[in-house]
Image: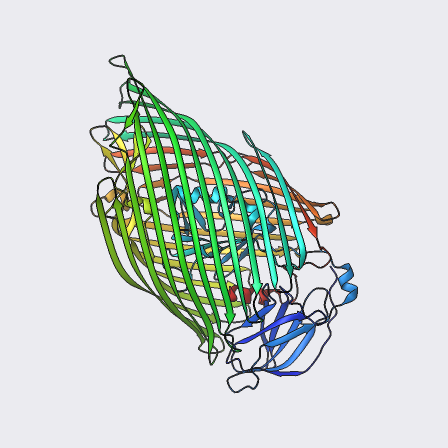
Amino acid sequence: MLVAAACTGAHTVQAQTSGTLVGAVSDSVTQKSLAFATVVVKKGSDPSFVLSTMTDEKGAFRFDGLAAGTYNLLGSYIGYKNILVESVVVGANAAGNNPLTIALAPDQKLLKEVTVIGNRPFIELRADKVVLNVAESPIAQGGTASEVLSRAPGVVEQGGRYLVRGKTALVLIDGKVTNLGGNDLAELLASLPSNTLDKVEVVANPSARYDANGGAVINILTKKNSAFGTNGSVSAGVGAGRFARYNGGFTLSYRRDKLNVFGGLDCQRTKQYRRFDSNRVLNQETRIDEASYSVTERNSQTARINVDYDLTKRSSIGLQVRGISSARETGGHTNSAVGDLGAPLSTTNVLQTNGTARGLNPTISLYYRTLLDSAGGELKLNADYLSFDKRFNEQYRNAGYDLQNEEATANALRTYSPANNSVASFTADYTRSLGKATALEAGLKSLRTVTDSDIHWENLGAAGNWFNDARRTNHFVYREYINAGYASVRRPVSEKVSTELGLRAEHTHSEGESLTLQQLNKRDYFNLFPSVALDYNMSEKQQWNLSYQRKIDRFRFDIVNPFLTYISPYLYYQGNPSIRPSFSNNYSISHSYNNEVVTSVSYGRHTNALAEVFRRDPATNILIQSDANLSRATTLDANVSLTKQFGGGAITTTNFVGATYVRFYSPTMPWLNQSSVGVMASSNNTVNMPSGIRAELNLFYRTPLTYGAYSFKAQYNGSIAVSTPVLKEKGTLTLTVLDPLNLQKNRYDTRAAEVQAYSLDKAETRFVRLNFNYRFGNQKVKIIRTRRTGIENEKNRLEGAAN
């Protein structure tokens, strides 16, 4: 890649920014904004002081927390001549009222030759977050959002929820709450193609502006357009495991002057098997063995359109519409055998299962953003609506045989279950500088969630007619309203120390209504969630962070439904209408060295801890799974990550090692108090070879881990991919092999008062994929996502703080 020669234009600019420096970078000829340009700030009296950032999609940049003084700014962008702006005065007494404008002159020689886009690493480890640059990962091409999250360092999926450093994570899409959990969240992420994703942010210690629910945040960001003109791409892929799969789609974007439009359509078909084996011992007398095999086919279509329009130089509006349509078909069987310990089997059973599920997930988001003053005051208004409609049709046919009495039995069940989850929210966020390098964030939020689950069960009569099964049929509606306000203040204590104080207040009103039982449970509670963070810039290479946060873990909406849910002949799930949310106090310390090594230790103390429990029905020997509040729990996590480049950036390796310890305390269920330390390790490696060829290798390992009712065995897997440019570098061809040795499986033991269970859950994970992507449109001047320069480390530091 050619590098622009520096050209210096020295002049003095004064701006009344009160510790905040804002401005924009533009083309000096066309006056168009330059997105992702680099702006570097240096302090004239302190040559060791260097900060940098990249402009946003509208060419704007912002520096908060600057002490009063005089600074020099360097603006640069590929294909343009660098410019130096000297003597920019920051402070309450500085003259001037307008944001700073940096105009870069085009370098005609470079504009004709630059056609290369730099690559970011797939995983960027920072002191405050982990960023997965999905588009930069060959392994991710043609996959799903759930596959991407499975490769995030320190992220563990367990029972339809995600844990980050031992804390339950709130999963967002484009910063918006989904309020989905369990199977609903799993279905959504399995239907969301990775080709539609830009990046994923994993925030272990989120600030007060995030919802208090969950101790961590996973924010899945979808792709948006930032290039000028008309551009687009088409993609297609095929793959195979035990069964064939395919994906395809296109994007089209147009950006000119004040208007930016981006849209696309993606389709995906997957088919995979799942095997589940369970061996249970009940009351040290009876054993139940179950072996299940099922095949699930998913077809999904994802359509999206984004429209942004600049009303003025200071304000803009936008609309985002996304819709996911999914269809799922499942067929399988479960073989069960029951007998006394040390005696021959007494009963066998074969369950045949066939079912379909249809889902529709539309999302509509509106925003308005405006700059209120030259000091960087900004107001953002967002209105969002999300719906998740489901329609289940399933049939179960049981064929049993009593070996002792030589009697056969048969019965059939079927269910029709329409359900709807809807989430509506409105947020107002305000940011500005208050003087003396102090930054303020404040906002309001109103969130309404309604889940309506109408489950119909029917039995097949002797005459061939279907009749209602009153034991299982139930209609349950849950409504939750959360109104919240927050404020946080960040200010420097000295040149090296800064603090952030935050407070979030939330009032929750909930109504769980069983229309079948004619029972209504209401609940109101108000809580304050303080947070404190202390940053210490020990040197240019070393930074420390201390933080405290109070959080709430809210239960899944289906947990409060008291009815029994049929899973298999000897396994049911029952909700708990008396469940309460859990509260936690979380403490964390982290250290970053040279933006390469990040170390953190965190501790959490939870009250009313949410935990899964099991019990045996003595009359039927059915195992019933439920959720309960335990008196308390503690979590302890320690993590070390290393990012290193070799060969001038040709090889990038990101390695993570983390230890976690979770312990529950229950005086009435002592078997839940057992725990052990588990260690997780992952390594992601990319190699950039000649001719644009790129290879990626990902490895994962987790030692055995015990907490609560579960004891998990070791897990391990790996994946590899190779991509190469084709068609004059306008296309990319990627070959991916996921879990080539077919090692990934979930093995665990379950304990209860009278139950010991040994389970193997093996979903198909070995696949081969071939994916093709072709880009069209104006390819001469591209938005450069990353350029390796002498200030790369400082730029990453600032990006981490700004995001």
Give the answer, above or below, for where 686 lies relative to 549: above
How has the structure been colored for display? rainbow
User: Is residue 599 at all visible to an observer of this figure?
Assistant: yes
User: Is residue 625 at all visible to an observer of this figure?
Assistant: no
Quadrant assignment, res 285: top left
Give the answer, above or below, for where 375 lies relative to 121: below
Q: Is residue 111 left or right of residue 207?
A: right
Considering depth in this image, is 249 or 385 the residue closer to the camera? 385
Residue 128 x/y as whole percent: 47, 62
Q: Give me the residue at 31% from left, 51% from top.
A: 479
Quadrant assignment, res 505: bottom left
Residue at the extreme top: 406
Considering depth in this image, is 231 or 196 the residue closer to the camera? 231
Residue 516 x/y as whole percent: 24, 39
Residue at the extreme right: 109
Considering depth in this image, is 424 or 67 the residue closer to the camera? 424
Residue 525 x/y as whole percent: 26, 59
Q: Quadrant of the N terminus?
A: bottom right
Residue 588 x/y as whole percent: 40, 62
Numbered marks: total: 0
Q: Give me the residue at 57% from left, 84% from top.
A: 96
Q: Is residue 407 left or right of residue 441?
A: left
